[in-house]
């Protein structure tokens, strides 16, 4: 991708999390789940990968990806998403086929819940108090 003005380089911040990639066992199902639960949009790069497009102005065009593999490894960093309406997010996750594994519960600064997606990835969603 050509970027003569350097705009994309200015959007990336030194030592900041720049891109997150989820391993999924069924790419089509993962795209359906995240699209339905969180309104995420995707760019397909072939049968085993889809980029997660950013919807925020001023951010890079992609913020992550879904990579298909035979299995998902448990553990690792916990990705937390922000929600302006936590109860609505719980409802959207369960309606889309996710499983709430903890909460919602209070923590210093707000409330949150954890869920697993259809591939078994665990994420969390939090909201301010």
Image (cartoon, rainbow, N blue to C red):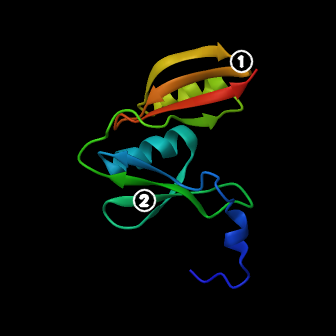
Q: Position of residue 40 (x, y in %)?
A: 55, 49
Query: Quick one: SS at disc 2?
Result: strand
Q: Quadrant of the N terminus?
A: bottom right
- Quarter of the figure with residue 111: top right
Q: Earlier in the sequence, mark 1 or mark 2?
A: 2
* Callout 1 crowding tier (Cα within 10 Å): few <14, some 14–19, many ≥20: few
User: Which residue extends farthest front?
Assistant: 15
Task: For the C terminus, give its image quadrant.
Answer: top right
Q: Residues within 10 Å of mark 2 (few under 14, many from 20)?
A: many
Instruction: Give the left or right position of residue 116, taking residue 9 as reference.
Output: left
| Position above or below: 88 against 58 | above
Q: Secondary structure at mark 1?
A: loop
The residue under the point 60% across, 37% down is 81
At 28% from the left and 50% from the top, the residue drawn is 69
Viewer-proximal residue, 96 or 64? 64
Q: In which quadrant of the rendered view does residue 82 lie?
A: top right
Mark 1 — residue?
Answer: 108
Total residue callouts: 2
Q: Is residue 10 left or right of residue 49?
A: right
Closest to the observer, 15 or 54 = 15
Q: Up-down: is 117 above or below 110?
A: below
Disc 2: which residue: 50
């Amino acid at each position: 991708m050509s970027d003569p003005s350097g705009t994309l380089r200015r959007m990336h911040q030194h030592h900041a999390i720049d891109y997150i990639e989820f391993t999924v066992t069924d790419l089509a199902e993962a795209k359906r789940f995240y699209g339905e639960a969180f309104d995420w949009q995707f760019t397909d790069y072939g049968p085993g990968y889809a980029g997660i497009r950013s919807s925020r102005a001023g951010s890079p065009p992609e913020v992550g990806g879904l990579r298909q593999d035979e299995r998902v490894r448990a553990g690792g960093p916990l990705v937390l998403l922000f929600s302006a309406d936590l109860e609505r997010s719980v409802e959207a996750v369960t309606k889309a086929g996710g499983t709430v594994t903890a909460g919602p519960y209070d923590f210093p600064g707000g409330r949150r819940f954890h869920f697993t997606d259809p591939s078994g990835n665990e994420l969390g969603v939090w909201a301010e108090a």
